[in-house]
Amino acid sequence: METRSDHSPRVATTAGSLESSVFESASRIERDLNDLVEALALLGVKRCSCCRHFFRSSDPGALFDYGKLVCFACIPGWWSSQSSQIGVMEREKIESKLSAWLRKYHGAEIVKEGREDLEDGEHEFQIVTSCFECRGSGRIMEGERCRFCNGLGTVRIVVPK
């Protein structure tokens, strides 16, 4: 029995040093990976905050920047979760920026609300946003109904397939 008690502290010390060694190795690998990601950023490669894939920053349509970067493929899922978590003012600000980005880089079109001729399968992604022309009021300068949104104050931004 004395031999077992002699070996117990040695086994515990060995296990403790092995655990410490594994932790140090994992910490070193994590630092190396962070350094690698920073080096890629210096070379103009940026990462999507959702899927963690890398994209060239020279392609402005690859990543949408709202303070964090989101790739085009992640936009539908990201927007459905993001829009429900933020306030109205912040949501409208991001919607405006997102719709301009979708129109500029992904061929999105502005569709007046009430237009039912678009089938669900014809588009890849859509959002409803405040009308740009009347700023969501539905009225233009002289109190006339806005012709861009039919007076509803909203338009759909549709990204075709």
Image (cartoon, helix red, strand yellow):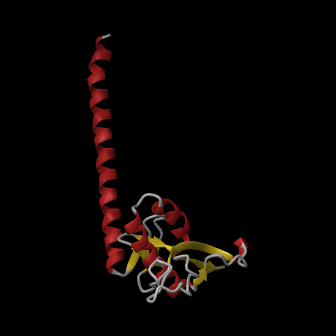
Left or right: 131 as drawn, with respect to 57: right
Q: How many marks?
A: 0
Q: Position of residue 159 (x, y in %)?
A: 60, 79
**Which quadrant: the C terminus?**
bottom right
Closest to the observer, 118 or 61: 118
Q: Position of residue 156 (x, y in %)?
A: 58, 76
Closest to the observer, 79 or 51: 79
Q: Residue at x 51, y 74 (%)?
A: 129
Answer whether residue 47 is visible to the viewer in this image.
no
Left or right: 101 as drawn, with respect to 2: right
Left or right: 72 as drawn, with respect to 120: left
Q: Position of residue 83 (x, y in %)?
A: 47, 63
Residue positioned most to the top: 1
Answer whether residue 11 is visible to the viewer in this image.
yes
Q: Residue at x 46, y 62 (%)?
A: 82
Closest to the observer, 45 or 85: 85
Q: Position of residue 14 (x, y in %)?
A: 30, 33
When asked about the image quadrant of residue 97, the answer is: bottom left
- Whether 110 is drawn above or below 9: the answer is below
Left or right: 38 as drawn, with respect to 97: left
Closest to the observer, 20 or 31: 31
Q: Residue at x 52, y 81 (%)?
A: 102
**Which quadrant: the N terminus?**
top left
Residue positioned most to the front: 143
Residue positioned most to the bottom: 142
